[in-house]
Amino acid sequence: MKNDDVFERQLFSITTIIETKLRIDNLVYSSQGSGFYYTEQSPAEEGKTGPQWYKLDKFWLVTNRHVVVSEIDGKEYLPDSFTFCFRENIDGQIKWKPITLSKNELSNVLKLHKDKNVDVAILDVSQFVNDVIKECTQSEKKPSIYLPASLSNKNLPENQPLTIDVTSDIIVASYPKGFYDKFNKFPIVKSGIVASGWGLNFNGDPMFQIDAQLFPGSSGGLVISKPTNIAFIDGSVKYSKYKQFVFLGIYSGEYLWREKVKIDGKETEVKHSYGLGNVWYSHLVPQIISEGIKFK
């Protein structure tokens, strides 16, 4: 990666692994998921051209509700510890810089959708990012931490000229449990296509389907359009110096359908997979930011 604008470098600053621990009586439940950072930017100054500075109003960590909130025996729990990470370059080696929140800290920054069936959760991590920025600016050494400032509201579909349709190419960046680049702390990127009507609520839910089968630990992964610097926009071919993409949504697992069958005379529920994945629409993120509720 030769400069800060290549797409691989952007994935470094956008994505993170997530780990949680929950203790109930003498049992400890540990889980791993994926997440990514979303930044709110102030609008550009009207009438001004050329390079501009944008105010970064808020930093959010986006993941799935089920990554943050565990359901055990029909009851929901917040974990006792919730860890997300920034990346730090120490003598040429990429290391995780973990940030661990207690249950109370997590509760204070967590926002959920009013509909608990919407599997999206966001955390206001602005204070933690600002602390890291202060640490970098006050240090005499060259800043070594990758700050989460690459994905913003400017990447939402309504703010991008790129067209998305059924069969459009997509990618998912996530941290499958037990398999990702632990040396470079780089996510696994899988490709696929939009497999249901784009903009439509699949089976009545604000989600769409992708033809891209992923693995446990990928929940909360970032779903975007395939980055490109050449696109057909407004009837003509256009070129961008840097690859552009649209923030499409949040991956939350396989689409499974259940069937009751009899095995040895006993009725059993069997799960089936079509090899498709559920993706909650990106517009839910700003919606939860403005209307989200606390965990109860």
Image (cartoon, rainbow, N blue to C red):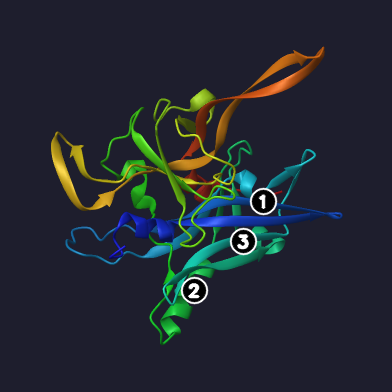
What residue would you read off at disc 3? 83
Amino acid carrying mark 3 in the image: Thr
Q: Secondary structure at mark 1?
A: strand
In this rendered view, identify the residue nearer to me: 271 or 120: 271
Image-based side of 44 in relation to 137, left or right: left
Query: CB of mark 1 within 8 Å of CB of mark 3?
Result: no
Task: Identify the image quadrant of residue 156.
Answer: top left
Q: CA distance from mark 1 to mark 3?
A: 11 Å
Q: Residue at x 74, y 55 (%)?
A: 22
Q: Residue at x 70, y 46 (%)?
A: 70
Crowd band around label 3 with a 10 angstrom C-alpha radius: few (<14), some (14–19), many (20+): some
What residue would you read off at disc 2? 132
What residue would you read off at disc 1? 31
Crowd band around label 1 with a 10 angstrom C-alpha radius: few (<14), some (14–19), many (20+): some
In this rendered view, identify the residue nearer to me: 94 or 207: 94
Q: CA distance from mark 1 to mark 2?
A: 26 Å
* Earlier residue among tags 1 and 2: 1
In this rendered view, identify the residue nearer to me: 87 or 82: 87
Q: Is residue 244 above or below residue 119?
A: below
Q: Position of residue 53 (x, y in %)?
A: 28, 67
